[in-house]
Structures are given as C-alpha cells and as structure tokens.
Amino acid sequence: MTYLSAITAVHTFIRLAAIVAGVFAVVDLFRPAARGTAVRVFLWLAFLTSATGFLFPGLMLTPAVIVGIIALLVLAAVAWAARRLHRLGPYQAVFASGVVASLYLLVFVGIAQAFQKVPLLHAPAPTGGELPFAVAQAVVLFAFIAIGLAAARRGRMPGIRPA
C-alpha cells in the first residue's frame, strides 16, 4: 500500500465516521438531557478529518485546502464558544451553529467526492459545474442553513444547563 492510498483510506474513513457522529451530535444539540459525548466525538473526528487532509502529498492551495482551512476556523470558533458557554447567550448560538456548519462542510466535500468518484453521479456532472451537482449542493446547503438557524435559536451544548 502506498502512502497516498494509505492516507486516502484513513482520511476517508475518518471523514465518514465524522459525518455519522455529526448526525448524532446535531440531534444532541436539540436534546436537553444529552450528555455531550456525540458532540465531543464529532468535534474530534471533524478536526482529524481536516488535519489528515493536510497530509496529502503535493499540498497546494486548492478548493479542498481552502475548505479544510475554513473547517479548522469553524472548529476553532466552536472551541472558543465552548470555553465560554458558562455565560450562555451568544456563545451557545456560536457553538450550536458551528457544530452544524462543521458537519455541513464534511457533507459538502462528501458530495463533491461522490460526484467525482461514483460513475452514476459523475456521468451527468463530469466537471462539477453542471446542474445536478449544483442542485445537490443547493439542497444540502439550504437544509443545513435551516438546521443551523434552528440550532442557533434552540440548540444547546449537551451537558451544559442554564443556571
């Protein structure tokens, strides 16, 4: 197994695990009795996904690298908000919407990869600029915007209760 195939396999496995954990994490944002384990696991996996993305050889400034940088900045904002959650208020909104945004970025990249690698999806959108790709990304974007807004309004960090 070459370095490239090994890092691709590890990165892909972590990304898929992060997406699954992210679904549970977002659900936990809306559950007042949640303990926060899913959110913590998701945040670590999301971080590892972005970090392993920078281990690919020939690193240059590409859309994938830009998304990785944005993902790390979102995770930094989530970590910052988590440290200040005892004050609640806007920190809780930053935390909740940041968790949703982090999951969105993973799904966004997953869709882009699927359209590149899955023949059934690649055929109608070979360059990623075609309508099927745009529609898929738009539907996911609007769904995540709705979830993110709801999380910012009603979401809470699992394990943290208002005083």
Image: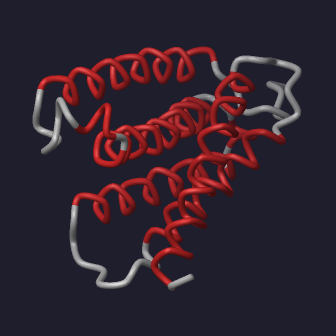
Residue 58 image point, x, y percent: 29, 84
Residue 160 position within the rendered picture, expressed as x and y whole percent measured from the top left: 82, 33
Nearer to us in this view, 163 or 1 = 1
**Residue 60 relative to residue 158: left or right:** left
Relative side of 136 to 55, left or right: left
Identify the image's colour scheme: rainbow, by chain, secondary structure or one colour: secondary structure
The quadrant the N terminus occupies is bottom right
Q: Position of residue 61 (x, y in %)?
A: 21, 72
Question: Where's the C terminus, which quadrant?
Answer: top right
Seen at 84% across and 42% down, the residue is 37
Q: Position of residue 123 (x, y in %)?
A: 20, 35
Residue at image coords 20%, 24%: 132
Q: Is residue 85 above or below residue 29?
A: below
Q: Quadrant of residue 70?
A: bottom left
Note whether 11 is above or below 106 in the view shown: below
Viewer-side residue, 59 vs 97: 59
- The image shows residue 122, relative to residue 16, as above or below, that is above
- Residue under the point 52% across and 70% down: 51
Q: How many marks?
A: 0
Q: Residue at x 75, y 26 (%)?
A: 28
Quarter of the figure with residue 47? bottom right
Along the horizontal axis of the image, is 147 left or right of 16? left
- The vertical placement of 72 against 93, above or below, is below
| Relative depth, front residue between 43 and 14 | 14
